[in-house]
Amino acid sequence: MIDQSGARLSRRVALQSLAFAGCVGVTGGRLNAAESGFRDYLMGLRKPDGGFGWSDQPGSHLVATHAVVGCCVALQIELTDVEMLAEFVRREHPAAFKPPKQHYREFDLQQIETLQWLGQDVSAFHAKAVRWKAPIPYANQYEKHAYPIFCKQIATLLCRDKLNLSWDDLNEPMRVYVAQRRRPNGSFNNTPSDDGSDGHVVATWWGLQAASLFGQVSELRERLVPWLQACQQNDGGFTWQPNPSMSARSTVTYTRAALRSLQLFNAKPLDQQAAATFLRSLKNPDDGFAERPGWLSNPLSTYHAVDALASLEIAAEADRLRLQRTQTSGATQAVPLPQKLRVFSAQIQSHGTGSPRDAVLLAQRLGIHLWGAKNAKPEWIAAAQRIADQDGVAVQFAVANEDYGTWIEVPGEGTYSHMSDIMAENASAAEGALTRGKVLTWDEYRKKRLQPLEKAGGRLIWQFGENEDLVRLLLDDSLDRGGFAAISTFHFGNPDFTDTEPFLHLYRGQIPFVALQDAHGPQPWWFADMTTGFRTLFLAEEPSWDGWLKALQYNWTIAVRRDARTDNQLIMHSASQSLSDYVIQRQEQWSWWLEGENSRPMSSLVAIGPDDTFETGCPAKGIAIRVRCAWSNTGQGLLKEPLSKLLSLTVDGQVVPTREIRSQSKNGKWNDIHDLYEMPEGVRGQHQAEARVHVLSTGEQIIESIRF
């Protein structure tokens, strides 16, 4: 199953994989011709860094690697360069991209399991695993009750078990925690059962694994098997609970969880053949499996499909369970893109505070056509738009708010914030019903906030969520009834949400991907690292609000990032390869790193008067000239290192003295540095100012000039 450069699989794992393979049609330990395409699909996901990744991404990911290795173990597909593969698995924990708000223990579990499949030593995980002593509360600014995320806690036990470590110190707190999440019918969910909610099939699979360690599985059989069987739908697949109130769709994730749970009881689904037919319907022409029929293939869904087929255990009918697809399956073909579409740039939740003039300058120099201002006063947006129109800058300022204090309750999952990020053309369209400080059910939120927003031409953007079961319910419901119009990927605080929430990849081609600035700090100028480094591209005939809405409707948006966080490598999230190819072929319309117009300015030179009340240095009367030079910045909009330096300021050809003014934040870091020159009173008429600036990285001197 692996080449001679790596250790052999353990006997236990090998025996498991042989049984696994027999259920999906492997003959004599080798794939036949019908399955060779499946091997090619898996091997096509290999990346230069040693692991396996998503088909549209240049690098590997742990979840994709775990999925591919799991398939290869099951089907006895030979893996090469095992040592390089193992090194990737040890090195690349997805939570390393940022300090996690929640411990990502399911990633640790996947590291351990993958390395064990590869016959590698996992003793290095012992020290980490023994430090886990109890369930970790989730941050209560994200979930009102600080309920721990269920799967992440169960992964703690499973890691200890796979490492053959004692979990006596975890016994009491974990038994209590798991028991509190068990429903009277034997199912499990994220909240304590005393809230009266039903279980979730994925949480139930996790809970049963814990119950198995506790020796409690048999006592659940009578109540739980009928519940699991009732999750089966007419299409043969399984949904997340019997007769759900929302998102009653079959997915491979739910189907695998249900079948694996039934397998623990030596039980079968009510219609075993229908379940197999559903799983085969997920096979696509590229020989991978999708999450739902007609969706794009991905390694995670492929692994779940193979594992689910194995759990059916219909080896006597292996010819019916081989990995060929059914007549009706296959990913929906993308509609060809109209060639008249142009590529435009949008920033979502960019600054809506601080200097409107700096915002206009950044939009002009970086080629931003739609600037979604975060939680801006209507007067700020009006001021920015007025300046842009006066200066001939082709940018539209719109509303892109984060509804702080809005909480949405989903039975069984909890009460979460950060689920109400809206975009609208103007303030009146963004108003809707006030939801701040209120706890709403999802249906109440849809009625009070979403419906008025959509009626006024606004849209709802998904920001982030680490409870996968919850997020998928809401995204799936949005596909059924409308709701979240786009999914956030790149972000100021997380280089890429799809790294720490990899299940978002399943929605590629179904819900548009966007980048979300989520601007922090008082000034747009001191957030320019982010404003420059990532953005959302959209295809339209014109960069209007209607063009933006049409791009969301047809999935013509592409999240792009290229900065220090990506090692200056271009990373993209789009609905299809054809969409990515379309924008790459038109890089001159949007790229900010090639020679061209869309480059970051090294200084801001503005003239401000008494009416410019949003501007720092606004004089009581007369005119002031303000210069800001470029610095690298933190994610909180604080200054790090200078990128340029002011050499001189001239007004009407004469060098004038400036005052450098600095201000500090509470942590002692600079939050603003600017030079100010106040013109003498009574000076009238037209004037010209020029700032000579030294670019520190190149030694170049540049001149910025304005007329006022």
Image (cartoon, grey):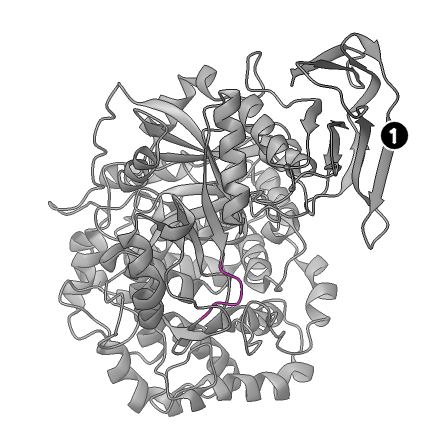
Residue 106 percent across, percent down from the top left: 54, 62
The mark tally for this picture is 1
Q: Which of 385 and 338 is in front in this view?
A: 385
Give SS at disc 1: strand
Q: Which of 264 and 498 is in front in this view?
A: 498
As drawn, which residue projects farthest toward the front?
682
Residue 577 falls in which quadrant of the image?
top left
Q: Nearer the viewer, residue 155 or 195?
A: 195
Q: What residue did someone put label 1 on? A: 659
Q: Can residue 260 be seen in this view?
A: no
Residue 626 percent across, percent down from the top left: 75, 28
Determine if the magenta segment contains residue 29: no
As drawn, which residue projects farthest toward the top?
653
Q: Nearer the viewer, residue 269 or 671?
A: 671
Residue, x 75% and y 36% (percent of image)? 619
Q: What stretch is highlighted in magenta?
A: 403-407
Q: Can residue 190 be seen in this view?
A: yes
